[in-house]
Image (cartoon, rainbow, N blue to C red):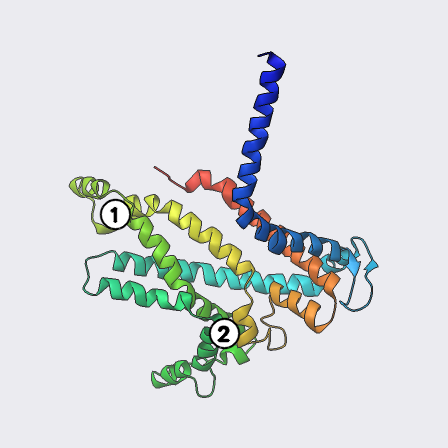
Amino acid sequence: MTDTARKAGRRRAALKNALWVLVFLAPSAVPLLVFKLAPMFASAWVSLHKWNMISPMEWVGLGNYADLLTSGNTWEVFSHTLLYILGYLPLVYAGGLLIAVALNQKLKARGFLRAAYFVPVVTSWVAVALVWQWLLNPSNGLVNHLLGLVGLPQPGWWTDPTWAIPSVILASAWKDLGFVMVILLAGLQAIPQEIQEAATVDGAGRWRRFWSVTFPLLSPSTFFVVVISLINGFQVFDQVYVMTGGGPSGASQVAVGRIYDLAFRYGEAGTASALSWILFAVILAVTAVQMRGQKKWVNYA
């Protein structure tokens, strides 16, 4: 057989393998293309137009982006989103870590407690937001009732511009504690027991073992939680929409809420699409910084 025939045979075999790969990828690749990638490209195209979803689209190029970047409202909703993240992330991580450490001990009904803490994660956001809206009701909510019993101030919570974002943070952290707990608990159980025993033999106490051994070895799980929580934080919407509607007076309006309003309240689909791409760029940049910086503090040993 000549070299040309052998090369042709290899090309046919490679093409056949590629076709079989496509066949096996099709069940997941086709939905990804139809329901993810195609809408993304369509959104990018819409963002270059002025469109109310009824009349024909009008080409404006990068005009929507320029208007958004020079609008004070855009920076305001991003500042609210950042304020939410700054309150939510430390609270949900610290709470999840505390629960994970506690449930990593040999406790009675440990399995039941783990399941109980995870129940809010699989509960509908609408249901959770409505429950917390009632709990934080300024006039007849349970939280203010308990605060009044011990003589503490009773905030206006979601009806007060100052307390609107903290109200959403409390509800969000409560719902997501179980998710963070499960991830960190898995990380704790992956730490070799021999390392803990060696630290004990060297005279390290419980706190010293935690901060010098456990916490550094938990960094891969911490990194995952931080990345996912930041991405989810930038996309916060459901709880804000149900609890505050972005109010009062826009005090809790966030980026995704603004996208929703632009598209479905004001009929500015082009501007809404442009803002969604700006949000995408922000999330991508923040995630890229985290991925690059992980080498300095994440320990995979």
Q: Does residue 244 sit above or below 276 in this rendering?
A: below
Could you say whether the residue bearing mark 1 is in a helix, strand or loop? Answer: helix
Total labels: the figure holds 2
Residue 109, percent across and down?
21, 65
Residue at left offset 47%, top offset 84%: 138
Q: For this view, does 49 lie left or right of residue 293?
A: right
Q: Which quarter of the rendered picture does the C terminus lie within? A: top left
Q: Does residue 266 sit above or below 91 in this rendering?
A: below
Q: Which residue is identified by label 2?
A: 126
Q: CA distance from mark 1 to mark 2?
A: 42 Å
Name the residue nearer the viewer: 261 or 29: 29
Q: Which residue is identified by label 1?
A: 208
Q: Which quarter of the rendered picture does the N terminus lie within? A: top right
Could you say whether the residue bearing mark 2 is in a helix, strand or loop? Answer: helix
* Callout 1 amino acid: Arg
Q: Quadrant of residue 101?
A: bottom left
Residue at left offset 58%, top offset 17%: 6
